[in-house]
């Protein structure tokens, strides 16, 4: 698994500013959940048991790779893997790659003052 700091890389010079901006965005988007892990855990359990993935999805890895992303963004990526299950032969590597790309995209889209 990639450490959360590795996702941010050198693009974030002031971590405090970045975190404050992310929290502000979460509050505005109503995506601030006291236990986002619980919702993700339930969704991964459903995908593994009823969604046809046969325990191929690892909750801990998904949570680690998705650290820093809004819960809604993680759910959107889980929905993509669910919708494309027949085309994805190795769902965990696919999910990890999609979560990393989403993280990098979010950092790149952040305003300049947030990245400094």
Image (cartoon, rainbow, N blue to C red):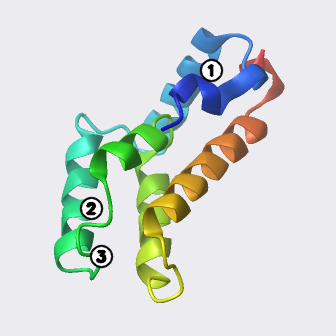
Residue ID at (70%, 35%): 107
Q: Which residue is mark 2?
A: 44
CA distance for labels 1 and 2:
28 Å
The residue at the point 17 percent across, 74 percent down is 49
What mark, if any, has residue 18 been given in the picture?
Answer: 1
| Residue 70 in sight here | yes
Q: Secondary structure at mark 3?
A: loop
- Residue 26 coordinates in the image, percent (x, y): 47, 37
Q: Is residue 95 left or right of residue 8?
A: left
Residue 77: where, in percent of width, then height? 49, 63
Q: Residues within 10 Å of mark 1 (few under 14, many from 20)?
A: many
**Which element is circle 2 on?**
helix
**Which quarter shows the C terminus?**
top right
Residue 32 place in picture, x, y as percent = 36, 37
Give the mark, 2 or 3, whose residue is nearer the N terminus.
Answer: 2
| Number of the front mark, 2 or 3 | 3
Residue 113 picture location, percent across and down: 78, 19
Q: Is residue 4 left or right of residue 59?
A: right
Q: Which residue is mark 3?
A: 53
Tag 3–tag 1 contact (CB < 8 Å): no
- Precedes in sequence: disc 3 or disc 1: 1
* Apparent side of residue 45 relative to residue 112 in the rendered image (left or right): left
Mark 2 Cα-neighbour bin, 10 Å: few <14, some 14–19, many ≥20: many
SS of the residue under disc 1:
helix
Q: Nearer the viewer, residue 3 or 115?
A: 3
């Amino acid at each position: 698994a990639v450490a959360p700091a590795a996702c941010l890389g050198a693009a974030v010079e002031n971590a405090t500013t970045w975190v404050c901006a992310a929290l502000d965005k979460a509050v505005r988007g109503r995506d601030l959940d006291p236990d986002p892990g619980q919702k993700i855990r339930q969704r991964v359990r459903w995908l593994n048991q009823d969604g046809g993935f046969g325990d191929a999805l690892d909750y801990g890895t998904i949570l680690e790779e998705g650290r820093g992303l809004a819960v809604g963004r993680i759910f959107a990526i889980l929905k993509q893997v669910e919708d494309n299950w027949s085309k994805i032969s190795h769902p965990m590597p696919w999910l990890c790659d999609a979560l990393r790309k989403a993280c990098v995209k979010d950092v790149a889209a952040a305003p300049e003052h947030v990245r400094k």
